Image (spheres, rainbow, N blue to C red):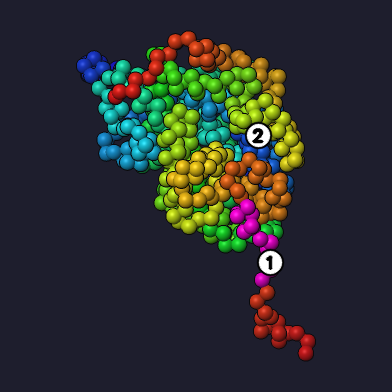
Amino acid sequence: MDRVSVLLANKWKWSLLDEAKRWGVQRIEECLSCGACVGSCPAARTSSYNFRKIIRDVMLGNEEKVLSSREIWYCFYCFYCTSKCPSMVEIPYFIMRLRRMAMERGYGGGILRVLALTSSNLLKHGVSVLPSDYDKMNPTGAEEAMVKLRKKLGLPPVMKVSEKALGELKTIFEETGFEGEVGKLLSGKGYFKEVSEKY
Amino acid sequence: MVNEKWLEKIPADGPFYLFQGCFINHNYPGIEAATRFILDKLGVRYFVSEDQSCCGLPEFSTLANPLMLTCLVGRNMDVVKEYAPYILTPCNGCYSAFHTSFTLMKDPEVAARTEEILGKLGRKYSPVKVIHFADFVYKRLEDIVVKTVKILGGLKMAAHYGCHYFVFEEEGLDSRENPSFAEKIIEKLGGEPVNYTAKDECCGFGMIQQVVHKNMAYAITEEKINSILDAGAEAVLVICPYCLNVLDKNQKVLRDIELIEKAIPVIHISQLVALVLGADPDRMGFEMHSVDVKPFLDRVEARKVEFKGWSSAEVAASPK
């Protein structure tokens, strides 16, 4: 960073912005504050979510406020905002990055625990959705029912990821730290703090 | 406006690797049966393998782990290479997983770590062209129309594209601002496409909102369905199994609390095309739909050759 940026970063705490600006999200400072994103946003219509507030707090470096709140978990990841944004800011990727940063700082407890249930399927079977997730009334017989239906439709039984592939996946789960994350979330121990409802 | 350049690049004859999305394979097998039926009818070769895994999007959208997405996508693409040069998927989720990973790989740190992890498996990250099944249908529409044995008897259908169909960096077959190719498919198959105000909006799934903030998901589905009903549609056409699930199942709840006036059947594009090509409606997996599809099936009629009387030239030529 050049001298001016360093001084500004110290004064305005831009480190949060720099850390958030990854994963292909480059144009975040080009936000014009025009509000097209909020006007088109399904989450803004149904909750207190307001991306302009979030982006302002990121620019001002209000790290704890942004990352500890429920606000960043409202995004629908629908990209409607990006299609309306005159600067083409990829807001959903940016929100995903903020969620990741929140996790790394130990926030997001209750929400993440619910979401980790899908991930435990992947760890065991190599697929994320099982027949039992759908057929909640009949969790034990769900797979059998699905195999029966698939037979009626002239299809092979449900896809079972091969042993060879599961072995490779195991390496990926360990190397990416995914297995550890899911384990911590499902252990029930307080590794993650609950989100703050106030913003 | 349909992007002609994108259309040109879609391989019409394959061969394809038919990507086995978890949601289709384990919950909506009717979509898989219909897709295979269409490919067989058109004589297109396709392959499947049990060496593939989940696409990785659920892991990215829930626990926001970028490496899980890039590594799973990279591994799957390496598996696919052994079978076919293109991936075909009838799911917006799987489709966007590949494209999201291409974006994430622009981050040098993510790219380096992904290559390192895949290297340990003896694999490497090299992109494969991914084709959405709806794009394929549009590309082969003329061939499909020639082979149809049934027709939609003027059925009013509303098309829902789904958010993750639209790929921003590379455009895609249509832009998000008033897309039109699904309407053309409906029209060519004898239906009447209807336009509605909430066309480019989310179905309500919101990746995690259907699980985390259910009330928000229901509110968005309510808006969507009411907009479709106001436009006078009799069925909804979707190109993604998740949109199918949310629009279909949420209607049951919305109907119970009387937020929508009536329920409307939701049909996946593969089911629609397979039906007009003569597939047995009993083998389209409609058991898994919660809204009754009978009103829709009743409108799929046998195609009759219209006789408008002899033309004057034919009358003149006939023997007296």
Q: Is residue A152 above or below residue B102?
A: below
Q: Residue at x 63, y 19 (%)?
A: A124
- Residue where numbered disc 2 is placed: B25
Q: Closest to the observer: B268 or A4? A: B268
Q: Chain of mark 2?
A: B
Q: Using the rendered view, name the quadrant where residue A33 is placed.
A: top left
Q: Tell me if residue B74 is in the magenta stretch.
A: no
Residue B152 — which label? Answer: none
Q: Are marks 1 and 2 on the same chain?
A: yes
Compared across the picture, whether A44 is left or right of B315 comes to: left
Is residue A81 something one can see in this rendering?
no
Crowd class of label 2 (few under 14; some 14 to 19; many from 20; radius 10 Å): many
Q: Position of residue B76 (x, y in %)?
A: 62, 27
Q: Secondary structure at mark 1?
A: loop
Q: Position of residue A85 (x, y in %)?
A: 34, 39
Q: Closest to the observer: B300 or A142? A: A142
Mark nearer the N terminus (1 vs 2): 2
Q: Position of residue A118 (x, y in %)?
A: 55, 24
Magenta residues, start to end: B294-306
Residue furthest out toward the right: B319
Compared across the picture, whether B41 is left or right of A128 comes to: right
- Asked whether the residues under the numbered discs 1 and 2 touch, taking CB atoms below 8 Å apart as contact, a structural biologist would say no
Is residue A63 something one can see in this rendering?
yes
- Residue where numbered disc 1 is placed: B304
Compared across the picture, whether B223 is left or right of A29 comes to: right
Q: Residue at x 66, y 84 (%)?
A: B312
Q: Using the rendered view, name the quadrant where residue B242 is placed.
A: top right
Say which amino acid is labelled 2: Asn
Say which amino acid is labelled 1: Lys
